[in-house]
Amino acid sequence: MNEIAFIFAGFFVGLVVGLTGVGGGSLMTPLLIFGFGIKPHLAIGTDLLFAAFTKLGGSVKLARARVIDWRMVGQMAAGSLPASLLTLYVLNQVGATDPAVQRVMTTTLGVALLLTAAATLYKALLGKAIAKHIHADDIHAATQPKHWALPVLLGAVMGALVTLTSVGAGAIGVTVLMLLYPALPLPRIVAADIAHAVPLTLVAGLGHASLGSVNWPLLALLLAGSLPGIYVGSHFLLKTPDRVVRSLLSVLLAYAGAKLIAI
């Protein structure tokens, strides 16, 4: 029975990831800990590789639709991947994630997610609707940050957070990209976030695997459900009204934030 439950959990999270770019760590890690009683260190390590393979499936779908801006992905990865490797080195030197540090990180991130959820819901209900598509001539201008270093610096913060908690590759990533590229349509923001999360969670996940923090049979069951789920979700991403996606995103962020604070 548990095997079937894990597969359905994977499908649900994969569906949400494909539709919003959020759900890998924000939903799966609390679900594994509170719903299935998985130990936190195993939930974090397993979820990182789960997110990597799940979002790889979504990236293939979105790449075929040509909605991924690879330059944006590269700028974020230039900061996140070195930060992830540095964080893994520190974890390896310490021997394990310190419970007190983990508590501070998850609580801080939970508060940030709650605040982000409120801002996202405000934009969904009262803000101006952003076009689902953008003219080819305007794409270059819309993908220019105010300063070239901002994506790299914010990517570095994401890299450290994701490696420590498995949360942030989607929830924080979408929010960061919305702030950096406010004129960019939401589908392109979600697509870039999903593509960037693949190398980040893969590096962090393999690092945790080297520390013995991955449950491989559990990972296989979750992927059996998530890969079809994210394919379906990413298909509907381009057809779902922007306000619906933003509203769903705010609910997910609020849920994730509350769970993180409760850990």
Image (tube, helix red, strand yellow):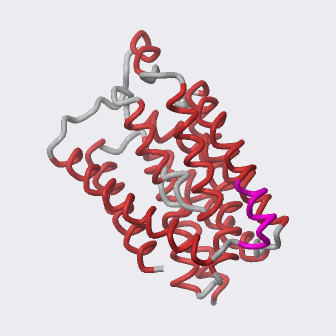
Point out residue 142 in the picture as x, y percentages from the top left corner: 40, 20
Instruction: Determine if the magenta segment contains residue 261.
Output: no
Front residue of 30 and 82: 82
Judged by its main secondary structure, the magenta piece is: helix
Residue at point 47%, 41% (across, down): 190
The correct choice, above or below, for 226 with respect to 245 in the image is: below
Tally the numbered discs.
0
Residue 91 falls within the magenta-colored stretch? yes
- Residue 3 pos. (x, y %): 67, 83
- Name the residue at 60% across, 24% down: 71
Whether 149 is drawn above or below 210: the answer is: above
Q: Quadrant of residue 218?
A: bottom right
- Looking at the rendered image, the quarter that the N terminus falls into is bottom right
Q: Position of residue 63 (x, y in %)?
A: 61, 33
Pinpoint residue 186: horizontal percent, then vertical percent: 38, 37
Residue pictured at 42% horizontal, 80% vertical: 262
| Nearer-the-camera pick, 28 or 96 | 96
Q: Is residue 54 above or below residue 182?
A: below
Q: Nearer the viewer, residue 60 or 191?
A: 191
Look at the image and give the residue range highlighted in magenta: 87-96
